Image: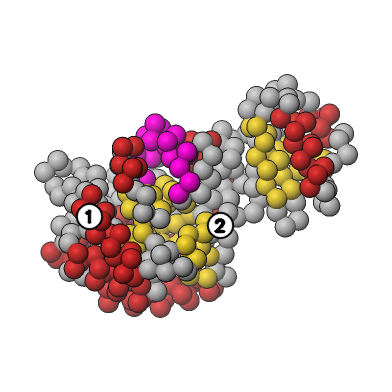
């Protein structure tokens, strides 16, 4: 249930009204916008009289939420959420609410020289975040699985040298203890419905980059976000990374329509991964620009300084030179959409 308050209501009145509602057995999600204050009632609202609420002198209107996701619902928070991340260089990078983030780096951390070189290159080109995998979920048990904790240490070293905040994938709950230095935790497509892991992340206060499952609906993605938000962590970035279809020409099929669909349904930032969506480096620039034109709040792009010798996903990784060239176009697309790259 959504309760929209009248304009000009004093903070003390809102607090008192919130306490009154909580006595009826529901939890309150409070959203204060520039012009509106919205109360989201979470829990069993069947016993709350809608007409009685409408009669309250503070209430403008009352709405029933039909969708199963509540906290992620734009009705709960009409204004876009912005996720702020401060890097080790003291610079604040933002995602959402008019800020578009470019996250770039190799699929996997391979060695110190590789990750530091790529980190320096993507920063010089204008990327705001460094991505890199230390723990890698692979379809084959014989494929390169990442360097693990050693790779994480190298990634954090590149973070320190460049000042870029880092984004890296968490695969299991027990790995959380070594993720203290990580700025944004990525949850991959295979773990999107690992509900035990999602619940644990609800107790975490780090931003979560949540990728859409390869066969998941938009509602299922939002429900996965709801699991995290229900635990108290609302710093979530949704990521469209392509879905599995009958076509095998590309690695996956990039669902560009998911961007405006999600932006309509939720206040959470939405970014796109054109690298995993296509699996082909030559397609990445076109799909990256298409995503920005569709209203995405950012991109996560794989960049490798020697894709032909990459230990993981070299065929979908662009070179630092190509990435730098692409950044020029992305700035123009962002400006056209009224957004600032960060």
Its colouring scheme is secondary structure
Q: Position of residue 172 (x, y in %)?
A: 31, 38
* Location of the N terminus (image quadrant): top right
Q: Position of residue 70 (x, y in %)?
A: 59, 37
Q: Position of residue 23 (x, y in %)?
A: 73, 26
**Residue 59 numbered tag:** none
Q: Is residue 47 above or below residue 118?
A: above
Q: Quadrant of residue 303?
A: bottom left
Q: Residue at x 41, y 32 (%)?
A: 195
Instruction: Judge from the rendering whether residue 82 lies leftward or rightward of residue 184; answer left or right.
Output: right
Q: Is residue 92 above or below residue 141?
A: below
Q: Position of residue 341 (x, y in %)?
A: 48, 70
Q: Give the residue number, with chain letter if any, for mark 1.
A: 151
For the record, the magenta segment spans 187-206
Residue most toward the top? 47
Q: Is residue 320 above or below residue 223?
A: below
| 16 in magenta | no
In this orientation, which residue lies closer to the viewer: 166 or 33?
166
Crowding at dot 2, Cα within 10 Å, few <14 / some 14-19 / many 20+, comes out as some
Instruction: Judge from the rendering whether residue 314 lies leftward or rightward of residue 25; answer left or right.
Output: left
In this orientation, which residue lies closer to the viewer: 304 or 232?
232
Q: Give the residue number, with chain letter if any, for mark 2.
A: 82
Q: Could you tell me if residue 238 is visible in this image?
A: no
In this orientation, which residue lies closer to the viewer: 332 or 17?
17
Crowding at dot 1, Cα within 10 Å, few <14 / some 14-19 / many 20+, comes out as many
Query: What's the distance in space between the residues labelled 1 and 2, CA to CA?
Result: 29 Å
Q: Residue at x 57, y 47 (%)?
A: 266
């Amino acid at each position: 249930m959504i309760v929209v308050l009248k304009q000009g209501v004093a903070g003390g009145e809102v607090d008192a009204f919130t306490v009154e509602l909580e006595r009826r057995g529901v939890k309150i999600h409070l959203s204060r916008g520039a012009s509106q204050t919205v109360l989201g009632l979470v829990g069993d609202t069947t016993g709350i009289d809608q007409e009685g609420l409408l009669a309250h002198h503070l209430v403008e209107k009352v709405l029933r939420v039909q969708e199963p996701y509540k906290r992620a619902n734009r009705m709960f928070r009409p204004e876009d959420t912005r996720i702020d991340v401060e890097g080790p260089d003291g610079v604040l990078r933002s995602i959402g609410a008019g800020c578009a983030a470019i996250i770039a780096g190799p699929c996997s951390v391979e060695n110190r020289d590789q990750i530091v070189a790529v980190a320096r290159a993507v920063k010089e080109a204008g990327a705001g975040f460094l991505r890199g995998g230390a723990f890698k979920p692979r379809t084959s048990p014989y494929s390169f699985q990442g360097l693990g904790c050693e790779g994480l240490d190298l990634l954090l070293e590149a973070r320190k040298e460049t000042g870029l905040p880092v984004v890296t994938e968490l695969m299991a709950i027990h790995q959380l203890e070594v993720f203290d230095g990580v700025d944004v935790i990525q949850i991959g497509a295979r773990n999107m419905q690992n509900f035990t892991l999602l619940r644990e992340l609800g107790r975490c206060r780090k931003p979560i980059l949540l990728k859409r499952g390869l066969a998941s609906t938009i509602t299922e993605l939002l429900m996965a976000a709801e699991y995290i938000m229900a635990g108290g962590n609302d710093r979530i970035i949704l990521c469209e990374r392509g879905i599995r279809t009958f076509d095998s020409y590309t690695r996956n099929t990039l669902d560009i329509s998911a961007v405006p669909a999600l932006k309509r349904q939720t206040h959470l930032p939405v970014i796109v991964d054109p690298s995993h969506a296509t699996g082909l480096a030559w397609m990445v620039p076109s799909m990256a620009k298409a995503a920005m034109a569709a209203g995405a709040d950012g991109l996560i792009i794989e960049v490798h300084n020697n894709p032909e010798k990459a230990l993981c996903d070299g065929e979908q990784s662009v070179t630092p030179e190509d990435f730098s060239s692409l950044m020029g176009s992305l700035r123009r697309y962002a400006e056209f959409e009224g957004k600032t790259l960060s």
